[in-house]
Amino acid sequence: MRSTTALLLVSLARLCQLAPVIAAPYAIQPIFQSDFSQGNIEDDFGHVTTLYVPAAPLNWDATDVSHLRPAKDGFLYFTLDGSSDPAAKHSYILLENTYNHPTVILDHSVYPSVRSCHDNELVIEFSSPAAFKVAAESWSRGSTLVTHSAGCASTNQATKHSYWSVVHTKSDARSRCVKIQVRSIDVDQAIEATDVSWGSYSPVSQGHLRQRTMGSDDATLTGVLIDDLDPLR
């Protein structure tokens, strides 16, 4: 199964500053994958790029149960270390997506925990009765669930998103678990279109956050690679 982490592989130099570049007119290409435990990876030609991994969205209220309702629009956020602490300076990559089907990003909520992920079945437990109720009532056949839980990715690594089309759900209010029959799908089956932007955030002394956006997908960048989004171009 193809998956997105967005191995969002971005040259650090390009993330920190815009400079003259020479590259293909798109930034979506396959890349040789090496050891995901390393921050930098090297392709077959010796070019080193930096691996960005999924992170919670910046200033995101993960306690809002409405995030568990499937929606056609959403976004994925990536940082170097999987952290998006608003008190710390960090570089980021943002994918603003339009999905083919109503979609839930499980990792954008504090309430669901993936307890089992195998044989085309997900078992998800909820820490909140209200969150369980939202999932039990709104997750239906054809919805898409997205997670980067390590047990669900094809490589069993938490650096990758995996995409699951809901076939059937069975809810148990006593255990606050939802058992879901799913079908693994490729990213191009999940995402209709995406806008890519990148930049850096820096906290300021007043406690507010200053954003400096460095670019977007209408630019041509060397070293900007989004693994497995190739079918979308």
Image: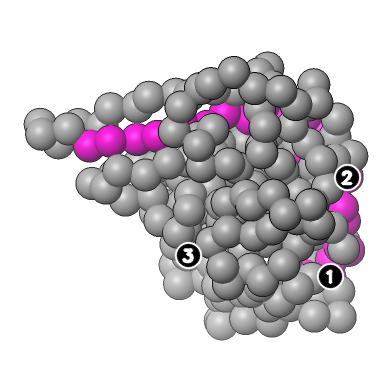
**Disc 1 versus disc 2: distance between alpha carbons?**
18 Å
Residue 202 x, y percent position in the rendering? 28, 36
Residue 180 x, y percent position in the rendering? 77, 70
- Between 106 and 96, the residue placed more toward the observer is 96
> Which residue sits at x=14%, y=36%?
207
> Which residue sits at x=84%, y=70%?
181
Identity, as a three-letter code, of the amino acid under mark 1:
Gln
67 vs 13: above or below = below
Magenta stretch bounds: 180-203
Residue 74 x, y percent position in the rendering? 62, 37
Magenta region includes residue 65: no
**Disc 1 versus disc 3: distance between alpha carbons?**
20 Å
Looking at this rendering, what residue extends furthest in the front direction? Answer: 46
Kindly indicate whether the residue at mark 2 contacts the one at mark 1 (C-beta within 8 angstroms): no
Give the mark nearest the N terminus, 1 or 2. Answer: 1
Q: Is residue 219 left or right of residue 80?
A: right
Report the residue marked by disc 3.
111
* Residue 216 at least partly seen: yes
Identity, as a three-letter code, of the amino acid under mark 3:
Tyr
What's the mark number on residue 181? Answer: 1
Q: Kindly indicate the quadrant of the structure image that contains residue 140.
A: bottom right
222 vs 78: above or below = above
Identity, as a three-letter code, of the amino acid under mark 2:
Gln
Looking at this rendering, what residue extends furthest in the left direction? Answer: 206
> Which residue sits at x=67%, y=71%?
35
Report the residue marked by disc 2.
189
> Which residue sits at x=56%, y=68%?
38
Q: Secondary structure at mark 3?
A: loop
Q: Secondary structure at mark 2?
A: helix
